[in-house]
């Protein structure tokens, strides 16, 4: 009789998984996949943080508004537009920079996993990048200058500026090109690298300067008193009081010619209301001199240049006031 128990096989040890062989075969693809996943997650996280910061700045503009006159001047709607535009532009630039840096680092790590000579590749890429940068140095200059102009708030959408090549109202500020509309309606595309200086008439406050030429034989003191009274009466009106920050001043004789003398009067105004205050004050000065019986010298043709032409782009927009409601007293019951 056969002893089946004696013929039964002995216990064999369990087969262990060969991790060494597994990593030798799949280690490189797994590490490459891990690098790509980490790079994508890092890019998404950084973009989310940048977007959150941009949204907080944009949405927090209204909370920074104050009701007193000085703060209202600084935090004007035009200033809010400039902050929003600058913040979004910088957010776009940061997103692009983050994407390029993460993609570059991930590419180098992947090439290292594939046993490429990373040092030689980086050296060759540096040489190629230097050649491209030298050949496209004007584009690089435009990009860098545009970033600095936006970051330093040199100009913004709606500002009246003089950048040298063009003078007018800024319609768009890009990283490479700034669009400016002049008094004739021409839209100028100015490369940021060509902008060497920026004269901005829309930040903070500005000053209306009027030189009034009166006949040589006119009484200067009387004319100055009439000019100051006309400007002071204008500043006392609620319609213009919010536009004129300080009291008007007569600076006196500006020049003396053979047939006339020039008297200068100035007024500190809000930047957005300079053109309107200038026109209204000139009209009142004309009426004041007419009341004195003074005939102003004839003027030659006027050519709008510089800031005078730029500020005229927006046209005449006098400030609008809310009418005071008038309730007629009722006399008995109405149907």
Image: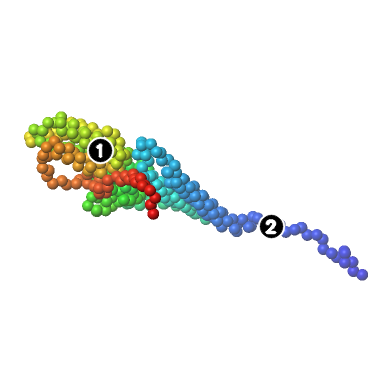
Residue at the limit of the structure toward the bottom, as seen here: 1
What residue is drawn where x is 25% and y is 41%?
277
Q: Where is residue 239 drawn, in percent x and y?
A: 29, 41
What residue is drawn where x is 23% and y is 36%?
231
Residue at the limit of the structure toward the left, as seen here: 258
Q: Where is residue 150 drawn, in percent x and y?
A: 36, 45
Q: Which residue is mark 1?
A: 234
State how far apart marks 2 and 1 are (Cα). Answer: 94 Å
Q: Where is residue 138 drawn, in percent x and y?
A: 31, 49
Q: Which residue is mark 2?
A: 17
Residue 210 is left or right of residue 154, and the answer is left
Q: Secondary structure at mark 2?
A: loop
Residue at the limit of the structure toward the front, as seen here: 332
Whether residue 328 is visible to the viewer of this picture, yes or no, is: yes
Residue 143 is left or right of residue 289, and the answer is right
What residue is drawn where x is 30% and y is 46%?
320
Quadrant location of residue 243?
A: top left
- Dot in front, 2 or 1: 1
Residue 79, numbered label:
none
Mark 2–mark 1 CB contact (< 8 Å): no
Q: Is residue 295 above or below residue 143?
A: above
Residue at the limit of the structure toward the right, as seen here: 1
Instruction: Give the camera-side residue of 171 and 225.
Output: 225
Number of numbered tags placed on the structure image: 2
Q: Earlier in the sequence, mark 2 or mark 1?
A: 2
Instruction: Give the camera-side residue of 183 and 190.
Output: 183
The quadrant the N terminus occupies is: bottom right
Q: Secondary structure at mark 1?
A: helix
What crowding class fits label 1: few (fewer than 14 Cα within 10 Å), some (14-19), or many (20 or more)? some
Whether residue 257 is visible to the viewer of this picture, yes or no, is: no
């Amino acid at each position: 009789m056969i002893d089946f128990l004696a013929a039964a096989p002995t216990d064999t040890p369990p087969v262990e998984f060969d991790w060494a062989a597994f990593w030798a075969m799949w280690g490189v693809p797994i590490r490459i996949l891990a690098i790509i996943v980490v790079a994508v997650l890092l890019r998404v996280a950084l973009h989310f943080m940048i977007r959150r910061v941009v949204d907080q700045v944009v949405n927090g503009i209204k909370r920074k508004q104050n009701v007193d006159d000085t703060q209202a001047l600084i935090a004007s709607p035009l200033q809010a537009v400039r902050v929003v535009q600058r913040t979004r532009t910088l957010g776009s630039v940061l997103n692009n920079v983050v994407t390029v840096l993460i993609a570059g680092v991930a590419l180098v790590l992947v090439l290292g996993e594939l046993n490429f000579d990373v040092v030689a590749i980086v050296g060759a890429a540096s040489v190629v990048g230097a050649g491209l940068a030298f050949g496209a140095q004007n584009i690089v200059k435009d990009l860098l200058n545009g970033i600095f102009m936006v970051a330093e708030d040199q100009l913004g959408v709606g500002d009246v500026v003089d950048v040298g090549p063009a003078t007018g109202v800024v319609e768009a500020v890009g990283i490479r090109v700034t669009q400016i509309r002049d008094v004739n309606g021409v839209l100028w595309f100015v490369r940021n690298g060509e902008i060497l200086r920026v004269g901005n008439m829309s930040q903070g406050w500005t000053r209306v300067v009027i030189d009034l030429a009166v006949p040589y034989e006119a009484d200067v003191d009387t004319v100055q008193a009439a000019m100051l009274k006309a400007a002071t009466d204008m500043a006392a009106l609620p319609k213009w009081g919010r536009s004129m920050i300080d009291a008007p001043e007569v600076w006196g004789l500006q020049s003396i010619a053979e047939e006339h003398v020039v008297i200068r009067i100035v007024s500190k105004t809000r930047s957005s209301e300079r053109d309107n205050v200038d026109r209204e004050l000139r009209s009142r000065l004309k009426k004041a001199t007419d009341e004195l019986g003074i005939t102003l010298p004839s003027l030659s043709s006027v050519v709008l240049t510089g800031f005078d032409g730029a500020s005229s782009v927006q046209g005449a927009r006098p400030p609008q006031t809310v009418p005071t409601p008038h309730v007629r007293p009722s006399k008995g019951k109405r149907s």
